[in-house]
């Protein structure tokens, strides 16, 4: 009698992560939002966003900071979510395109409370999670255009997701937010004068250390001047090597500049300090030269920061959800979405100067059908 070996048991397969189809996916594997390292992510958001844009907020008093609220924003840039996040210290969760949860950006977004949605094939899990967040009294931020605005200062037709979440989750209001970016064309004489005085101080410190200072002072000033020079030089080089290919996505160029600046500061500081320490007979010259180059570099860095672009955020009158609750869900969702488009569009028009076109399409076309199928499925499961 022939004895056959028993087939080896099939090892259990690890469930695929929510965004397994995204290269280098680093978002939440279960597709749900969490918040981690709150103090760190908030601090990083302030520093990163403030370093790239000068933020101007209009109608701050209309921002709602408590209770179940939906925050619906225009979407002209990938920088919109972190900037909107600066409007409130509350626990706010963000609905974001699954394809941007990659690398370091995906991790930071996840830590900040973002969760992914597949725009072309929305998941029931995403919809249920957004509704549950609102039922728990949290705030949910969504960019209802579902894409980056092609023409700055205008608004694309929007999806019904924000309205549906608000209606099914029992949100109190939908808060419309307009976003607009523009170059800084102001002279800012006071800030420029302060930068000039600071850079003059660096130059004076270098010259004084070279002429009168001891070895310790020369090393310290040389390290400072070298760090400033290296930060500006390598930061500028990295920015040039990684130009802004898409005006709507400033992140690659911005991160390259920051990484280059940090590396340049470290290398330049070590090189300047080492040169002053090792070349004893020329330490006075090293301190003087690095003081002058550091002064010029610090002024150039300050000028870039002073004249960074302006991000304008304008908060519109919140839309109370309760008056829409008595209607049929489909009718209420459509009416609420149309009103949301008007509110965001009119606030955007105030910022851009481009009149809002009342006759323009307000709802997304085929995407609405995709959302409708997913919404119907989610509704039938609840």
Image (tube, rainbow, N blue to C red):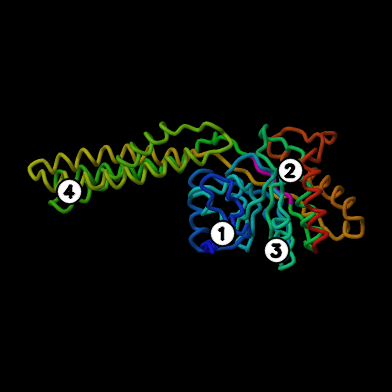
Q: Residues within 10 Å of mark 1 (few under 14, many from 20)?
A: few
Assign a secondary structure to mark 1.
loop
Q: Quadrant of the N terminus?
A: bottom right
> Where's the C terminus, which quadrant?
bottom right
- Which residue matches tag 2? 347
For residue 338, above or below residue 357:
below
Task: Please state the total of marks drawn on the protein image.
Answer: 4
- Majority secondary structure in the magenta region: strand
Q: CA distance from mark 2 to mark 4?
A: 56 Å
Instruction: Please state the extent of the stretch shown in magenta in the rendering.
Output: 176-180
Q: Considering only order in the chain, which callout, 3 or 1, is on the residue closer to the N terminus?
A: 1
Describe residue 194's horizontal placement relative to residue 116 as left or right: left
Residue bearing mark 3: 133
Cα distance in 3D space between marks 4 and 3: 58 Å
Mark 2, secondary structure of its residue: helix
The reply to whether dot 3 and dot 2 touch (C-beta < 8 Å) is no
Question: How far apart in space, not on screen, are marks 2 and 1 (Cα)?
Answer: 50 Å
Residue 13: which numbered mark, if any? 1
Distance from Cα at disc 1 to Cα at disc 3: 30 Å
Cα distance between the residues tagged 3 and 2? 27 Å
| Numbered circle sitting on residue 218 | 4
- Viewer-side residue, 47 vs 191: 47
- Check the image and name the residue furthest to the right: 327
Quarter residue 367 falls in: top right
Q: Nearer the viewer, residue 115 or 229?
A: 115
Residue at the spot x=23%, y=40% of the render? Answer: 290
How far from the left and from the top, in percent, is residue 328? 92, 55
Res 197 quadrant in image: top left
Q: CA distance from mark 4 to mark 1?
A: 62 Å
């Amino acid at each position: 009698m022939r004895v056959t070996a028993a087939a080896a048991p099939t090892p259990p397969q690890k469930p695929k992560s929510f965004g397994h189809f995204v290269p280098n996916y680093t978002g939440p594997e279960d597709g749900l939002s969490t918040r981690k390292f709150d103090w760190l992510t908030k601090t990083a958001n302030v520093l990163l966003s403030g370093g790239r844009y000068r933020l101007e907020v209009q109608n701050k008093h209309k921002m709602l900071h408590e209770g179940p609220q939906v925050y619906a924003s225009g979407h002209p840039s990938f920088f919109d979510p972190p900037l909107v996040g600066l409007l409130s210290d509350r626990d706010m969760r963000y609905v974001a395109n699954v394809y941007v949860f990659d690398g370091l950006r995906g991790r930071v977004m996840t830590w900040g409370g973002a969760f992914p949605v597949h725009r072309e094939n929305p998941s029931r899990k995403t919809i249920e999670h957004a509704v549950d967040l609102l039922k728990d009294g949290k705030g949910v931020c969504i960019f209802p255009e579902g894409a980056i605005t092609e023409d700055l200062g205008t608004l694309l037709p929007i999806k019904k997701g924000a309205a549906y979440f608000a209606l099914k989750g029992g949100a109190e209001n939908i808060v419309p937010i307009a976003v607009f970016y523009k170059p800084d064309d102001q002279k800012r004489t006071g800030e420029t004068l302060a930068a000039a005085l600071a850079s003059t101080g660096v130059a004076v410190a270098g010259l004084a250390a070279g002429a009168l200072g001891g070895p310790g002072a020369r090393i310290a000033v040389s390290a400072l001047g070298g760090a400033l020079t290296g930060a500006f030089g390598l930061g500028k080089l990295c920015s040039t090597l990684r130009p802004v290919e898409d005006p709507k996505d400033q992140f690659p160029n911005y991160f390259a500049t920051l990484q280059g600046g940090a590396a340049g500061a470290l290398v330049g500081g070590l090189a300047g300090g080492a040169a002053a320490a090792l070349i004893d007979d020329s330490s006075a010259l090293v301190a003087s030269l690095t003081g002058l180059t550091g002064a010029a570099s610090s002024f150039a860095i300050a000028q870039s920061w002073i004249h960074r672009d302006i991000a304008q955020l304008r908060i519109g009158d919140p839309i109370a959800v309760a008056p829409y609750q008595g209607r049929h869900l489909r009718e209420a969702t459509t009416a609420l979405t149309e009103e949301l488009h008007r509110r965001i569009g009119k606030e955007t028009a105030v910022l851009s100067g481009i009149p809002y076109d009342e006759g323009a399409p307000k709802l997304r076309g085929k995407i609405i059908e995709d959302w409708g199928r997913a919404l119907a499925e989610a509704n039938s499961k609840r």
